């Protein structure tokens, strides 16, 4: 009889625990890009601050997460620098593509039996030979110097500009000038910011933050069963909404990846706001 009653009590206790426990949705944190990870943790911290962790007996677990936010800010700053580098790589590829297109267009028009174009083709070929057919194929510094010289020569030579008009290449040179200027601006910005940005071990910081978040989630769920009179549902729902939002966007990105999309070129995930 005693064992039967004990079993009933155990079952009731287990059922009460299951009913009372608030479960937080887990996000596959490893799938987040560094910049996304920083945003996710920052939003999670902001949510909990609204509900005063100390009143929910979560101060110790929360403080461990919050203490790592300065390190995450360093990751974010470092990632922004990496983003500039990625932009520069794209611009460098684009200016190489543009000048190759100028060469190809000139070559194709030179094969046509249009007498009026022949002298302009000759002028453009001499101009391209002067600045080297390998322009754009070397390092950033060399490329930029050579493109600067090419554009200075182009803008100061009426015959070359006339040839560009006749061969319908003017818009290409205008675009080349614009992206070259943008590249130079980004290069200066990167140089300035790199000297101010502290280099950090993003992976090590994320591993430590993962553990702190996991411990916080466990503490949240445990306390939701221990302190029945306190409201864990409201902050929990808000955290779950954030997690669900990120989770859905991660799933959508994975679908696009499986479809062959170049998702690495997409903008980072940002949580929806109401």
Image (tube, rainbow, N blue to C red):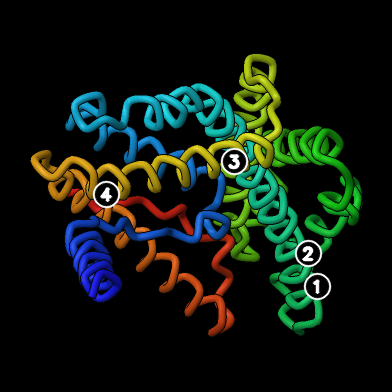
- The x, y position of residue 92, in whole percent, is 71, 48
Q: Which of the labelled discs sits on residue 239, or is there none?
A: 4
Q: Earlier in the sequence, mark 4 or mark 1?
A: 1
- The x, y position of residue 274, in whole percent, is 14, 50
CB under 8 Å between discs 2 and 1? yes
Dividing the picture into quadrants, the one containing residue 57 is top left
Q: Nearer the viewer, residue 119 or 69?
A: 69
Other residues around mark 3 within 10 Å, as few (<14) / some (14–19) / many (≥20): many
Q: Nearer the viewer, residue 85 or 264?
A: 264
Query: What separation in Å lies between label 2 and label 4 (alpha carbons)?
Result: 56 Å
Query: What separation in Å lies between label 4 and label 1 (alpha carbons)?
Result: 61 Å
Q: Which of the labelled discs sits on residue 208, or is there none?
A: none
Q: Which of the labelled discs sits on residue 107, or is there none?
A: 1
Q: Residue furthest left?
A: 229
Query: What separation in Å lies between label 3 and label 1 (alpha carbons)?
Result: 53 Å
Q: Nearer the viewer, residue 32 or 171?
A: 32
Residue occupied by mark 3 = 206
Q: Earlier in the sequence, mark 3 or mark 2?
A: 2
Quadrant in which the N terminus is drawn: bottom left
Task: State the residue at coordinates (28%, 33%).
Answer: 46
Looking at the image, is 29 positioned above or below residue 235?
below
Residue occupied by mark 2 = 103
């Amino acid at each position: 009889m005693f064992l039967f009653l004990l079993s009933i009590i155990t079952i009731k206790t287990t059922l009460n625990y299951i009913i009372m426990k608030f479960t937080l949705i887990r996000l596959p944190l490893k799938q987040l890009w560094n910049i996304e990870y920083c945003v996710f943790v920052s939003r999670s911290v902001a949510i909990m601050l609204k509900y005063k962790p100390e009143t929910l007996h979560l101060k110790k677990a929360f403080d461990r997460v919050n203490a790592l936010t300065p390190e995450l800010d360093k990751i974010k700053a470092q990632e922004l620098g990496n983003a500039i580098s990625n932009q520069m790589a794209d611009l460098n590829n684009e200016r190489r593509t543009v000048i190759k297109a100028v060469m190809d267009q000139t070559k194709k028009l030179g094969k046509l039996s249009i007498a009026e174009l022949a002298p302009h083709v000759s002028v453009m070929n001499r101009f391209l030979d002067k600045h080297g057919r390998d322009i754009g194929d070397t390092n950033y510094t060399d490329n930029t110097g050579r493109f600067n010289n090419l554009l200075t020569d182009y803008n100061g030579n009426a015959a070359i500009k006339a040839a560009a008009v006749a061969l319908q290449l003017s818009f290409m040179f205008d675009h080349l000038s614009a992206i070259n200027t943008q590249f130079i601006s980004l290069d200066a910005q990167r140089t300035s910011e790199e000297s101010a940005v502290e280099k950090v071990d993003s992976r090590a910081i994320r591993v430590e933050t993962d553990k702190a978040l996991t411990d916080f989630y466990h503490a949240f769920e445990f306390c939701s069963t221990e302190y029945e009179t306190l409201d864990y549902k409201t902050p929990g729902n808000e955290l779950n909404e954030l997690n669900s939002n990120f989770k859905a966007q991660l799933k959508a990105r994975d679908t696009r990846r499986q479809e062959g999309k170049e998702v690495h070129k997409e903008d980072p995930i940002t949580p929806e706001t109401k």
